[in-house]
Amino acid sequence: MSWLESLTLNSPSGFWNPIVWLAFLIVFAVIGYIIYSRGNRSYKPNTDQVKPYLSGNEVEDVEEIRVRAGDIYWGFIEALKGYYNVLMRMHTGDIRDYILWYLGLGAIILFILVGGV
Amino acid sequence: MIEHLPALMIAVPLFGAFVAPLLKKKGSAPAVWAMMITGVTLGMALLLVRQVLIQGIMVYVFGADNPHLVLPSGYRVPIRIIFEVDAIGAFMALSAALMSFIGAMYSYSHVRNETGLEKYYALLLLLEVGILGMVLTGDLFNLFVFLEIAGIAGSALVGFRNYRGEASEAGIKYLIVSAVASLMVLFSIGLLYGEYGNLNIAYLSTQIGFNTVDIIALGILFTSFAMKCGSVPTHHWVPDAYTEVPSGINPTLLVATYASLYALFRVSFSLFGKVSSGMSSVGWIMCVLGVLTMFIGVTMALVQKDVKRLMSYHAISQTGYMLLGVGVGLAVLNDPAKLAAFGRDAMAGGIFHIINHIIYKSLLLMTAGALFYVTGTRNLNEMGGLARRMPYTTIAFIVGAAAISGIPPFNGFASKFLIYETSYQLSPIFAIFAMVTSVLTLASFVKVFASAFLGPPVKKYEEVKEVPRSMVVAMLILAALCLLFGLFPNVVLDKLVYPAADALLKLSNYQTWGGIL
């Protein structure tokens, strides 16, 4: 068995080899660099050129306009409101409910096992 | 000395735990002491793994030279406390020892300003004792005792920052959940003892007849260990506990949780493995619970704003992968063709995911601890632009986030790859849920990365600096392990994981104490 084969992780219907993956990564990095190197050379960092422009209006303090964690995926959560309502009702934080869930799960498992479902 | 390793693995951290309080007024001595003890235990765990892989199952009898010495009448049943260490037990012991060492190293700086550190380190070492006892013992009652030790030490550590009301609440919740689960474990052990008059797992497994009482004992053991390992719908205690415990304890607490998962596997494969046809439905239950756990865990994580709470829900989600992988193996246990075709690989995927997850989730929780250390908050809404100030923590976070999302070449990918493919063979819907969960995992870590590390700098954090060196070193060790385990998964699979999966599958070896009886 060659060293390359020894690194290959075989699964029932596929394989994973990190060296092959790294080779692809290098190819994509080279392609990325070629695209980057053809970029606009007039770009100058640390000048007014890179400051945000808001149609001539004064830009607000950037700290105030940043996207906060609570805003990320707002649409996703809104779309799944019904699902999340159920989930939130499950997570009461009440220790008595934890024990009820335990008893419920135990009852279902015993019903399946003893009942032979 | 080597033959005493199973006992020394318990004795050394136990000795360390009793000595730690004596170092109360010696500055950072308890921290250094804990690092030394966990370091020695890690060395012994490596020796134990080597010994088990070379010589097979190690049997250690307390109070006698060998397990043949039974009753004077010649009645040949095991009557003493016996530790039986096979490859899966050694695998878990190594995970526990490694994470306790990393946790002690991280804690050196992380909790330096807290009071009562001698108790903190004593409890850390006791937690390690509890986990090691659970995974090394071959005796059901002994398993219960160590489960209790781990539960009590764990709950005290969860409530360690008792000046925070949330920590005290989380500690009490963890204590109650642990007590209920372990008392129900004790009750089912009582049922089995009443029937068979013995507590040795290997001996009991030869006697199990799968009558109604056995099935009730199995059902209770299954539910109790499922609750202790954080399976949905009994997972509610996990976010509270993982969020409130100091980040240096998170790695060890994670392994404590997976020691219960190990106990679930031990009960399913070793204690009841003889009735493999009857265990098929248990395997399906495990798979369904796994899928529910991974999906509900990740969708709850997506809406969290507390960085540690978000990661705690991910810990629940990742437990689902382990349940699914090993559940697939259990579901096809009585079908040799399917077991050979994909069942064994599924189990390897599930077991490999245990150590992978322990590594990257400890890393991620440590990065969350680092964020708390410098900002004093866990609220993601209040963070921003920290990548510039904390470059090492940022790199560690990126590695951990990529690993948990199953992005190659990090370790999470290798185990998830095995789980996707093998669970698809049992039921494609399982694999679809597993992949969707990975996508959602990546999405929620993008949220953390964008809100904590990227974006414009926040004025109040302009002066923050990278966390102290011991915390950085602990994080970078884990990040390196994420990469190493991902680049060379075959080495870990061949040396540790497949022997561990085979240890669960080869029941006859376990029943005969590795050929001793």
Image (cartoon, helix red, strand yellow):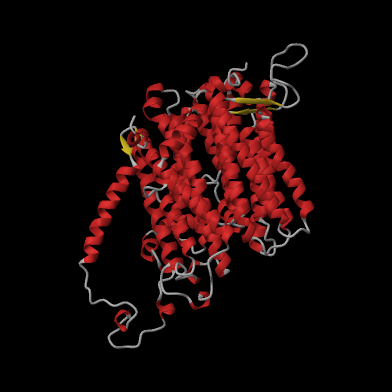
Q: In this view, does B487 lie to the left or right of B17?
A: left
Relative depth, front residue between B285 and B461: B461
Work out whether B23 lies above or below B57. below
**Residue B166 locus on image (x, y percent):** 63, 61
Q: x, y (%) of residue B437?
A: 40, 49
Name the residue at 43% across, 37% down.
B349
Q: Identify whether A28 is placed above or below B340.
A: below
Image position of B80 (left or right of A55): right
Q: Which residue is drawn at 44% across and 78% down?
A: A63
Which residue shows up at 38% across the image and 45% down it? B433
As drawn, A11 above or below B365? above
Residue A28: which quarter of the image? bottom left
For the view shown, which residue lies furthest in the left direction? Answer: A38
Residue B506 sits above or below residue B354 on the image: above
Image quadrant holding the C terminus of chain B, namely top right
- Image quadrant occupied by the N terminus of chain B: top right
Residue at 32% over, 80% down:
A52
Report x, y in % for residue B156. Answer: 69, 52
Is residue B314 among the parts visible in the rendering? yes
Residue lying farthest top?
A: B74
